[in-house]
Each structure stands twice: as structure tokens, then as C-alpha cells.
Image (cartoon, helix red, strand yellow):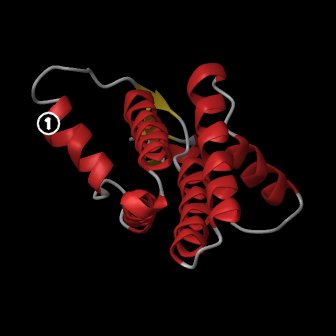
Amino acid sequence: MATLAGGTTAAVKRVDLNALRTNQILIISLAVVAFVIGTGSGGSWIVAAVALSMAIGTAVPGYGPFQLLYKHLLLRLGVISPKPRQEDPAPHRFAQAVGAAFLTASAVSLLAGATTLGWILTAIVVVLALTNLVFGFCAGCFVFFQLRKAGIGA
């Protein structure tokens, strides 16, 4: 809790950068595996599973499968340590929701036989996750702030 003017307190919002990075690595890795094995060999179902994981993590923060893997396996085994930073998690949740929507559309496209569209949508998510992972630029967060600046959203 942080003390504000007038003596009131507010919860300090934090983001675990290593949790975000783990999420990005899993998204990228699984999407690449899906592409390599192909649509007919279950690649479309892997894309659907990643979309579902991202959607759950957006709807119920901390309880998405990737988030649970990070928290209950990687942290407990000491494979990685948390790296918290004081920051609003809302832009990251927005970015994850957009990624989940793109991957859902991708999975539907792949399952419907529109493989070119499906893989293009998956590639967009991979490129944006990789950009965030390598350069620290979150395109979804940027869009979130632009929408907020325009008075759209919370």
C-alpha cells in the first residue's frame, strides 16, 4: 500500500517482468511448434490452446495455464526469480486479450481450411511478442495508452 495525500492509501500495482517474459516465450515457442508440425498434424489445436491460455489469463489474472506454470513450477524450482516492477498491469492484460483474439481467429481460420490467413494471424502475434521480448516494446500496451489518451476505455 502506498500513502497518498491526505493520508489515504492505495494498492501499489505491480507487474512481474519475468512472468511477462515467460508468457511471451511460451507463446512464441508454441506458435513456432504449431507452424512446424502443420495444420494437419495438430498445429491448429496448439494455436487454439495458446489462445485459450491467453484468454483465461486475461479473464482471471494469475490463473492462466502459462501463469500457473510460471508460478507453481518455474518459481518453485528456482528456474527463474520474480522481477516485480511498479506498473499498472491493465495495459499488459489488454495486449494479452488482443493476442488471444488474434490467435482465436487464427485457430478458427486454420480449422476452417483458411491456412494462409490463420498462419498470418499467428505470425502477427509471434512478431509482436518477439518485439516485446527482445526490445521491450509492447505494441498492445501502446494501443491501450493511445485509446486511453483518446478517451476510449478506462
Q: In x, y percent, where is residue 55?
A: 44, 65
The answer to whether residue 53 of the structure is visible from this angle is no
Disc 1 crowd, CA 10 A, few/some/many (<14, 14-19, 20+): few
Name which residue type carries label 1. Answer: Leu
Left or right: residue 16 versus residue 93 is left
Q: In x, y percent, where is residue 75?
A: 18, 29
Image quarter for residue 23? top left
The residue drawn where x is 27% and y is 55% is 65
What is the quadrant of the C terminus in the image? bottom right
Q: In this view, does 83 lie above or below 4?
A: above
The residue drawn where x is 72% and y is 42% is 139
Of 111 and 20, the residue lying toward us? 111
The residue drawn where x is 79% and y is 58% is 148
Of 149 and 58, the residue lying toward us? 58
Residue that mark 1 sits on: 73
The answer to whether residue 151 of the structure is visible from this angle is yes
What is the quadrant of the N terminus in the image? top left
Question: What is the residue that sits farthest to the left in this orientation?
Answer: 77
Q: In x, y percent, where is residue 103?
A: 55, 61
Question: What is the residue that sits farthest to the bottom in this orientation?
Answer: 112
Q: In x, y percent, where is residue 119?
A: 63, 55
